[in-house]
Image (spheres, grey):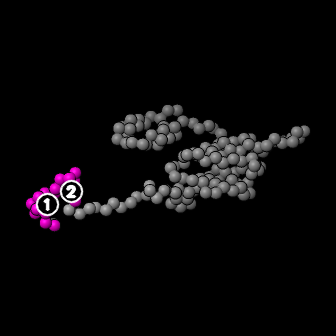
């Protein structure tokens, strides 16, 4: 399924948003029909998030969490059971899984814990100090540009304005 939205007008008037447009275009494509195991994404505050994945039956060493730039990958791979086990009914879905979560810029993993069959991953958006908005001071009328005198200085001479 292809997106019917044409992003070319946005490319003409924006710089550096390629990743966002790619995400929007790819969101219409199926990511795979297997949504197992189920998960929740929770917003806890202005800059705090939590991902909770139901991983009942998985041990801590059977789960891996990888944080790449703008991507969180959570994998589960059940270690092989003992050989010689004969199941009369095998209804537990303990198959391997991979969940990929696209992360915004500056979102980091702060904690991960396994508790009562739930994998809980804490996330926080931490904008670096140099990227935060800052107020710019406006200089007074006495400043000049490119070595030229301001019109007011030309009229008044070298006296202070």
- Front-lying residue, 142 or 26: 142
Query: Which of disc 2 and disc 1 is earlier in sequence?
Result: 2
Left of 143 or right of it: where is 5?
A: right
Q: Is residue 83 above or below residue 115?
A: above
Q: Is residue 10 above or below residue 50?
A: above
The percent position of residue 23, horizontal first and vertical second, equals 50, 41
User: Residue sitting at 68 percent across and 53 percent down?
Assistant: 119
The image quarter containing residue 84 is top right
The percent position of residue 160, horizontal first and vertical second, equals 16, 67
For the record, the magenta segment spans 143-160
- Front-lying residue, 69 or 103: 69
- The C terminus lies in which quarter of the figure? bottom left
Element type at mark 1 = helix
Q: Contact (CB < 8 A) between labels 1 and 2?
A: yes
Residue under label 2: 144
The percent position of residue 20, horizontal first and vertical second, equals 47, 43
Q: Give how far apart the Cα atoms at labels 1 and 2 are.
A: 9 Å
The image quarter containing residue 4 is top left
Residue at the outermost bottom position: 160
Q: Alpha-carbon neighbours of circle 1 within 10 Å: few (<14), some, or many (≥20)? A: some
Left of 135 or right of it: where is 60?
A: right
Residue at the outermost left position: 155
User: Residue sitting at 71 percent across and 55 percent down?
Assistant: 114
User: Residue sitting at 61 percent across and 43 percent down?
Assistant: 100
Residue at the outermost front position: 158
Residue under label 1: 153
Element type at mark 2 = loop
Residue at the outermost top position: 1
Q: Alpha-carbon neighbours of circle 2 within 10 Å: few (<14), some, or many (≥20)? A: few
The percent position of residue 75, horizontal first and vertical second, equals 68, 44
User: Residue sitting at 69 percent across and 47 percent down?
Assistant: 64
């Amino acid at each position: 399924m292809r997106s019917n939205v044409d992003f070319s007008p946005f490319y003409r008037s924006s710089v550096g948003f390629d990743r966002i447009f790619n995400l929007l275009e790819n969101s219409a494509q199926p990511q795979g029909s297997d949504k197992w195991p189920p998960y929740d994404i929770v917003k806890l505050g202005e800059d705090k998030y939590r991902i909770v994945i139901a991983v009942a039956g998985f041990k801590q060493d059977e789960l891996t969490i990888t944080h790449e730039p703008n991507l969180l990958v959570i994998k589960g791979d059940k270690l092989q059971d003992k050989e010689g086990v004969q199941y009369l009914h095998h209804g537990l879905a303990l198959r391997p899984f991979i969940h990929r979560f696209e992360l915004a810029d500056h979102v980091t993993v702060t904690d991960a814990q396994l508790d009562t069959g739930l994998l809980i991953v804490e996330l926080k958006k931490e904008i670096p100090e140099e990227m935060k908005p800052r107020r710019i001071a406006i200089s007074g009328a006495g400043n000049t540009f490119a070595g030229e005198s301001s019109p007011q200085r030309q009229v008044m001479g070298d006296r202070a304005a």
